């Protein structure tokens, strides 16, 4: 696989097992996990976060 493509693309599809395991987590653990993801997202450049938000709103 092309190294540049590796750096530009990301796709993740959780397996049914992953989803079932997540369902067993406590609310505190889920909240902590989501908060860590939010902190990582905030490290991205503002332009990338804005683009992600546009996709979430269905504008792209």
Image (cartoon, rainbow, N blue to C red):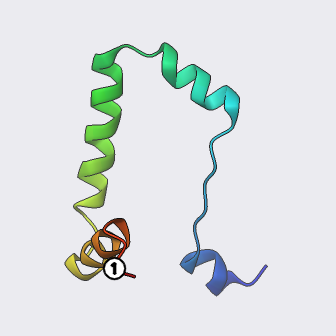
Q: Residue at x 29, y 59 (%)?
A: 41
Q: Which residue was labeled with disc 1?
A: 59
Residue at (35% x, 65% y) in the render: 56
Q: How many callouts does the rendering have? A: 1
Residue 35 placement (x, y as % from top left):
25, 39
Residue at the far right: name it: 1
Circle 1: element type: loop
Graded by Cα atoms within 10 Å as few (under 14), some (14 to 19) or many (20 or more), the crowding at tag 1 reads few
Image point (35%, 34%), residue name: 33
Answer with left or right where residue 7 lies relative to residue 25.
right
Q: What x and y, as percent, mark residue 1?
A: 79, 78
Q: State which quadrant residue 8 falls in.
A: bottom right
Work out whether 55 lies above or below 18.
below
Instruction: Say which of 16 and 57 sits in front.
Output: 57
**What is the quadrant of the C terminus in the image?**
bottom left
Q: How far from the left and from the top, in percent, is residue 29?
A: 34, 21
Q: Residue furthest front?
A: 58
Which residue corresponds to the image point at 22% horizontal and 61% vertical from the top-left? 42
Above or below, 27 against 51 in this view is: above
Residue 30: give x, y in percent of width and height.
35, 26
The residue nearer to you, when weighing 25 against 60, is 60
Horizontal relation, residue 24 to residue 4: left or right: left
């Amino acid at each position: 696989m092309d190294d540049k493509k590796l750096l530009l693309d990301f796709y993740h599809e959780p397996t049914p097992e992953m989803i079932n395991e997540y369902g067993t987590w406590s609310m505190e653990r889920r909240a902590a996990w989501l908060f860590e993801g939010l902190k990582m997202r905030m490290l991205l450049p503002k332009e990338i976060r804005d683009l992600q938000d546009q996709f979430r709103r269905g504008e792209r």
